[in-house]
Amino acid sequence: MHAREAHATDVGVAHAVVRRGVRDIGPSRDKRRPSPGEGGLSNAFSPLAWAPSRVAPRSTPDKVRDEALASAKILNASQRHNARLKCDDLTQGHVVWDSVPFRLILETNRRCNLRCVMCDNVHTGNGELAPWVVEKLFAEIGWGTMEIQPFGAGEPTLSPMSLLAPIARRYNNYFNFITNGVLFTREYYEDIADITGRVQFSIHSHRREIAQRIAHGQDFDLVVRNLRDAVRIAEDTGAHIVASQVVMDTNLDGLPDYVRFVADLGVRRILFSRLYPTSSAYAEHGIEVTRGPAEINDIAQHALEVALEHGIYLESNFEAIVHDPRNHPHLSSPFDVLHENAHIVELYRPDFCISTAITVFIEWDGTVLPCFQHRIPLGNLYEQSFGEIWNGPAMQRHRRTFLERDLQSFCSNCQRFFCDHA
Ligand SMILES: C[S@@+](CC[C@H](N)C(=O)[O-])C[C@H]1O[C@@H](n2cnc3c(N)ncnc32)[C@H](O)[C@@H]1O
Ligand code: SF4
């Protein structure tokens, strides 16, 4: 099943902003480079060590990179080597790359145990990615990858951990979960805590009734307990534990109280992401439909003030939040590198698409895609090696559009939407 509707809702990415809302608006090519801040959304990366804005002079990207890699204790030598190869590929404008992705979004299946009002993903009628395909993939590129997002358009706790956890350990890769939290129990987490870098719990309100109205089938009290337990476990490992909410008309007013609520649970990172305008729920639940920009801004600003009081970092695509210099992570973690590695693109070729540079999405049927925003099939792992796909004609064509600033209109829209961030 490859229906477009399966992509009508994104699965989100580790960095913060769940990417969506930008659709292909035709085959035209757009050479215009979006200006910073254009499009109303912005960079939601943490402004940490790799960010060029924090280093001077700008002409020393290798120094920035080498310092960041030296302090990234969780990486091994071949993963560091891959990061350096990536810099060469970008800076030299290769269309055939020696480096491999940093992050694998691995959709072993597309199942889910909930039904959320804003989620357009189709969770039935899909199959499973064969274990041999996963093994083959890691045998080929596991030397360089760092991170596994064990889901695609479904729920990661329904992934086969008995297959993925040993592979993650064998290849020194770390999990990044975006989960509805129902099955992310203390026992589940303890078994994989050594290989988990981030867990993002989707809890769409601090009020039980609203949260459960948004996520049909979610046991709010259970998920809150799981979140609290996860915070305790992560105190030992340093993993990022994130409370995440898709902001809609029903939960917008509660943002400041949501911050207080999760602060009491010990959470120090929150993701507030806007509902994708392309969602079928948008007409009914989109905040821009029912509220004015000033009101939205005031509420976001208020939530930020509460977050600052509590030492919480807000990942977000709300203007009022991302542009505030006071909003930054307050704690460092051994897993920061899994997010900050995206800054390589800013440092070495800022025009290039970050997702295309560092991530691949492997669908349950073996299809390989460079991103979630627009479905660009590059090949299929059942029929080809990863290398044949990664450096195949479709990927070369796609890379060339960035290198030659001859962007597809959907890429151009996407870069504008996220202000050049993935
Ligand atoms: C598709 S879900 C998959 C992971 C998991 N099942 C969950 O809900 O956390 C990935 C993320 O996308 C968010 N999401 C779902 N529908 C969305 C929409 N229409 N707009 C923005 N984010 C959405 C979810 O809240 C979640 O944070
Ligand atoms: S938990 Fe909700 S948002 Fe996540 S995949 Fe399932 S239905 Fe979609």
Image: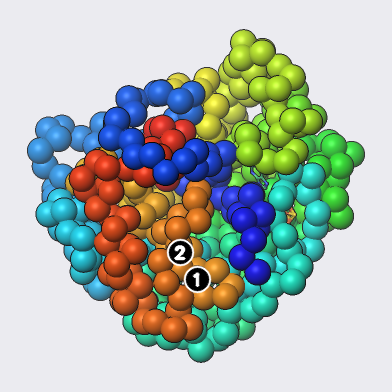
- Is the distance from the Cβ of mark 2 to the nearest ligand 1 atom less than 8 Å? no
Where residue 145 sits: x, y (%)? 36, 69
Residue 38 image position (x, y, % from top left): 41, 23
Q: Quadrant of residue 57?
A: top left
Question: Which residue is pictured at 71% across the width and 17% down the height?
Answer: 291
Number of labels in the image equals 2
Q: Is residue 257 visible?
A: no
In the image, 383: left or right of 395?
Answer: right
Image quadrant assignment for residue 158: bottom right
**Residue 419 figure quarter:** top left
Q: What is the residue that sits farthest to the front in this orientation?
A: 27
Residue in the picture at 67% in, 77% down: 127
In the figure, is residue 232 to the left or right of 320? right
Asked if the residues shown at circle 1 and circle 2 are in contact, with their CB atoms under 8 angstroms apart, the answer is: yes
- State the residue position of label 1: 367
Which residue is most to the right? 209
Q: Residue at x 69, y 72 (%)?
A: 126
**Could you tell me which secondary element the residue under label 2 belongs to?**
loop
Q: Camera-side residue: 258 or 352?
A: 352
Mark drawn on residue 377 = 2
Q: Quadrant of the C terminus?
A: top left
Q: Is 85 positioned to the left or the right of 114 in the image?
A: left
Which mark, residue 114? none
Q: Amino acid at mark 2?
A: Pro
Image: 367 above or below 9 = below
Q: In the rendering, at what x and y percent does residue 244 appear?
A: 64, 43
For the residue pair 206 and 386, the one nearer the viewer reads as 386
Is 378 displayed left or right of 306 in the figure? left
Element type where label 1 sits in the image? strand
Q: Tell me the kind of residue under disc 1.
A: Thr
Q: CA distance from mark 1 to mark 2?
A: 6 Å
